[in-house]
Structures are given as structure tokens and as C-alpha cells.
Amino acid sequence: MSQLKAAIIGCGGVARVHAHAINDNTDAQLMATVDIIEERATKYAHKYGHKTCKAYTDYKEMLKDPTIDVVHVCGPHYLHAPMVIDALKAGKHVLSEKPLAINLEQANEMIAVSEKSERNLGIILQNRYNLASCEAKKVINEGKIGKILGARAFVTWYRTKEYYLDSNWKGTWDKEGGGVLIDQAIHTIDLMQWFLGEVDWVQGSWANRFHPYIQVEDVAEALIQFKSGARGILFATNYYTYDSNIILEIHGENGKIFIEKDKARIETGNESYVVEESQEVKEGKSYWGSSHATQIADFYNDINLGKKHWIGAREAKKPLDIVLSIYKSQGQKVEFPL
Ligand SMILES: NC(=O)c1ccc[n+]([C@@H]2O[C@H](COP(=O)([O-])OP(=O)(O)OC[C@H]3O[C@@H](n4cnc5c(N)ncnc54)[C@H](O)[C@@H]3O)[C@@H](O)[C@H]2O)c1
């Protein structure tokens, strides 16, 4: 099998995690980097790329290179949709960062284009690959904690003034598409819906209390009512005093699963045990977890097998739907499907 030639669009914070994962993968080689800030594209090409890696400032120019097989989209949220669609239409496999998109129109177009395309589209929701998440999913599927009655999730992190002021897109509705919900809490919302299934309705609220210089919410809460009858409770904020461990508990009629960051405590009728990530977080922030590389390797493996990646546009729209429903809710019930 020849190596797949990769490109990264958007050489900012998260791109280095992708670059490392590409370099650690014997199936892949970084051959192009793109950023509207030329210096960033060049720096990434030199630091992480193959010796013939090319740096671009216009991603559409890079897409004309027929030797590029896979495009990693690591740009601002509002550009995920156009970058993904352009790359798929140029015949590339695409792996994009979360969230899928910032609104339903973009999301639906991405589903339509990707399902028509013969190429693979994957959306990074790496926490589904955490050992704790995989064990929780298995225990739930095997019925070991019985019928799921509810779940509660707490994301209490801290984003500083500099985090927002140093960015020209974070903190805005038109470019980030929201705040703590669409950017940070979406991973935990995704895990909750992955464990609990289809949503019936959502009722929630959001506000900005601590970051007056941004447009979007820095706190939100919701009741997520699942079709199974299970109730999901969510609280998320960006104005705690540090990035505390995320908590996600699943309550079943015969037991409980308590996930704290990357550790799960499983309590069923007759056993109690702990599953914990053994890998160190090698690249990126510790609260991003260590599963980016695992999902990226899985995506490349799917390309080689000619198999569609399991977290495509339709799958990644599920947590986005919950996020968008909370924005819409403002205290009112929002029925699904949106
Ligand atoms: N999965 C995770 O845990 C995780 C963690 C962090 C960030 N992310 C996601 O990664 C994405 C990027 O976030 P970030 O924190 O790295 O942002 P960032 O602002 O640090 O990087 C984005 C980069 O894109 C570049 N860019 C902007 N417009 C462009 C264009 N038209 N063409 C090419 N490049 C362009 C910017 O110059 C910047 O260098 C977001 O979707 C974010 O939500 C995911």
C-alpha cells in the first residue's frame, strides 16, 4: 500500500496534533500545509512536513494538486463547510475538526455532498475513542446497567480574556457559531447522545456573564429529553477558575457509569471496576485527551480498506443539533428533528 499524501488547512493550535498524528502514521505523509498567514504555513511545512512539503496561502490552489489524497481541515468553524465541500469536490478524502458546521444549512449541504461522494469524510470527535468512552458504550450495549434512566454532564472550564482577544474568530456568532456549547461542551454532548440515543426534545438557556467582550454564551444549561425516556442534564461554562475534570454520569436501573475526564468507574449489579487511559497526552492540551491520533489512524485505515468512516457528517450532526437546539430554545421546548 503506498503512503497517502496529506495536507493540513489551518496551521493554528490544533493542527500540530494532526501533524504529529500524520507523522506517527506509516500510511501517511504530510505534503502540503495551508494558512492565510504565510509564516504559519511555512513553519508547519518545515517543522512537520516531508522535505518536499509545499506551503500555500490559498487552500483552493492546494486542492488543484492531484497528488494530495487526504485533507485535514483545522480552520475556524464557519469555514469547515466550504473547505470540506471544496475538498470533497476536488476528489480528496477529508478529515475535519469539530464542530461539523455552524448552522443547519451548512450541515445539510455537507451531508448531501459527502453522501454523493466516493471519498471519505470524517469529523473529529476523538473522545469517542477514549478507553473510558469505549468501555461505557460496551457496558450500555450489553445491557449491564439495564435501562438507562438519565445522564448528567458538567463541563466547567476557563477561557481567559486573551484566549478570545488573541483570536479573530473565537467569541463571534458568525465565525465560531457560538461559545462554550459549540466549541468546548460539544464533545461531552456528543458522548451523552452516543450513549443515550435519539433526542425527543430539548429545553435550555444560555447567557454571557463573564466575558463581556465576546458576543457568544459563556454558560448554558439544558434538559435533553431522549426518545427512550431517559433525561439528560447538561451544565457548561467557560468562566470557572480552571479546566476542571469533565464529569459525565450515566444512571441505569441496574447500575451507574461515572466518567471523570479519561477515567470511568463502572458499577453494575455484581461488579465494580475502573477503566483508565494509560497513554500520556503527547501533543496538545491535556484536556483534549489522547485520542486524536487514534481517530486519525482509524480514518486512514478506513481509506485503505475502502470503508466509510463511522463519524461522518450525519453522525457529527447529532451533537450539533443539540447545540443548535439550546441556542434556539431560550427557555422554550425545541422538538426534534430540527
Ligand atoms: N478536537 C479537539 O479537541 C479540538 C481542540 C482544539 C481545537 N479544535 C478545533 O480545531 C479547529 C481550529 O481551532 P484552533 O484552536 O487550532 O484555531 P486557530 O485559530 O489556532 O487556528 C486556525 C488557523 O486557521 C487559519 N485560517 C483561517 N482562515 C483560513 C483560510 N481561509 N485558509 C487557510 N487557513 C485559514 C488561521 O490563520 C489559523 O492559523 C476548530 O474547529 C476547533 O474547534 C478541536
Image (cartoon, rainbow, N blue to C red):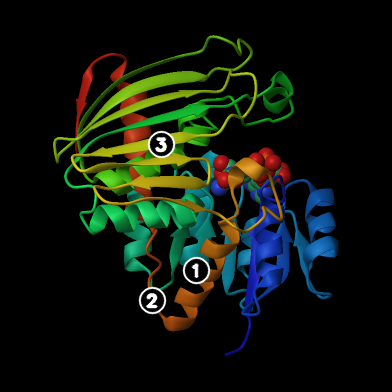
Label 1 to label 3: alpha-carbon separation? 26 Å
> Could you say which is closer to the camera, residue 222 or residue 251?
251
Q: Which mark is residue 248?
A: 3
Q: Position of residue 255 (x, y in %)?
A: 26, 42
**From this viewpoint, is residue 310 visible?**
yes
Give residue 253's quadrant in the image: top left
Label 2 to label 3: alpha-carbon separation? 31 Å
Give the amino acid type for the residue marked by disc 3 in the picture.
Leu
* Of the image marks 1 and 3, the number of the one nearer the N terminus: 3
Residue at 44% of width from left, 43% of height from top?
101
Q: Position of residue 138 (x, y in %)?
A: 32, 58
Q: Bin the neighbour count of mark 3 within 10 Å (Cα to Cα): few under 14, some 14-19, many 20 and up.
A: many
Give residue 288's quadrant in the image: top right
**From this viewpoint, is residue 103 visible?**
no
> Could you say which is closer to the camera, residue 193 or residue 307?
193
Mark closer to the observer (2, 3):
3
Q: Which mark is residue 307?
A: 2
> Could you say which is closer to the camera, residue 113 or residue 127?
127
- Residues at circles 1 and 2 in contact by the CB criterion of under 8 Å: no
- Which quadrant of the figure shows ligand 1? top right
Give the amino acid type for the residue marked by disc 1 in the picture.
Phe
* Of the image marks 2 and 3, the number of the one nearer the N terminus: 3
Give residue 70's quadrant in the image: bottom right
* Relative height, residue 266 to residue 240 (above, below): below
